[in-house]
Image (cartoon, rainbow, N blue to C red):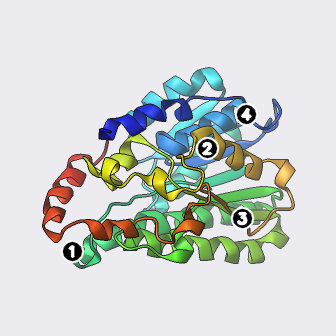
Amino acid sequence: MQAPDILAENQIAMEQKAPMLRDGALNGLVVVITGGGTGLGRSMAEQCLRLGARVAITSRKQESLDKATTEMATLGEVMSVACDVREADQVDAMRDAVLARWGRIDALVNNAAGNFISPTERLSPKAFRTIIDIVLIGTVNCSLSFGKHWIAKGEKDKCMLNVVTTYAWTGSGYVVPSACAKAGVLALTRSLAAEWGRLGIRTNAVAPGPFPTKGAWSRLLPGELVEKFDMRKKVPLGRLGEHHELADLVTYLLSPYSAYVNGEVVTIDGGEWLKGAGQFNLLEQIEPGMWDAIELLVRGTKGS
């Protein structure tokens, strides 16, 4: 099986199936999704729109945001704001742009992330810090910006949802910066749930297993690695996740139906982490001399 075949097999997974929730389940809600223009973030955004929410998507690249916004406009009210979540002032400006258009924000999905595979000893401090800044600091910046606004205005029934991963609690070799950052986001989730729950802000997380996306998939398992290390073999259900399955879970946790769910981390991975902790530990099978070639492949997919 060649590398593109797994993505082709899962094209159906990226296509919409009937939502789990009833029509109009998110009517009246304004949802902000970071990293919402591509991949899983876009699937979440599309599902929110189908259920009646108004959705703002963000990422660093306005060009990709414009394309996504145009394509999603048939589903409902959607806007885009370019924002580097690592920069607190940009996050505040993004928040204010959404408020200027719709006058309210009801939910924040911290989905923006960055990751790549590498033996830890090959990482520079800058490479390590890049992932920490996007995943952990970016989530902190957004959580503080939106949380402070809601608290200052005395607004209730608000929701923050963070995207983590199962190796946030198991750890995993070869993606150590991501594991450290996601562990921090997991701690943030539970801490804010305990502290801000009394203020009417629910904070939860989802921990997806392997869900194929074109950009992230090619960076994490570039070239023939996607064939050699077939993630399906690690999943007891014997398949990869389908985008609509994660989108259904996310929209449930954003909806009023989950009003008593707070501080929870919901795993959706087909049982993968129970079968073998450390999603990328299997990369120990790679010969040391292969890492230079792999790094070139990863760099070649940057920004895809």
Residue on which the image places disc 4: 19
- Closer to us: 71 or 294: 294
Could you say whether the residue bearing mark 1 is in a helix, strand or loop? helix
Q: Which mark is residue 203?
A: 3
Q: Is residue 69 above or below residue 139?
A: above
Residue on which the image places disc 2: 98
Could you say whether the residue bearing mark 3 is in a helix, strand or loop? strand
Q: Residue at x 38, y 72 (%)?
A: 177
Q: Between marks 3 and 1, how big is the CA–CA gap?
A: 35 Å
Q: Is residue 83 above or below residue 272?
A: above
Give the side of residue 157 with respect to residue 59, left or right.
Answer: right
Residue on which the image places disc 1: 122
Could you say whether the residue bearing mark 2 is in a helix, strand or loop? helix
Q: Earlier in the sequence, mark 1 or mark 2?
A: 2
Give the side of residue 248 with respect to residue 303, left or right.
Answer: right
Quadrant where the C terminus sits is top left
Q: Residue at x 68, y 49 (%)?
A: 250
Could you say whether the residue bearing mark 4 is in a helix, strand or loop? loop
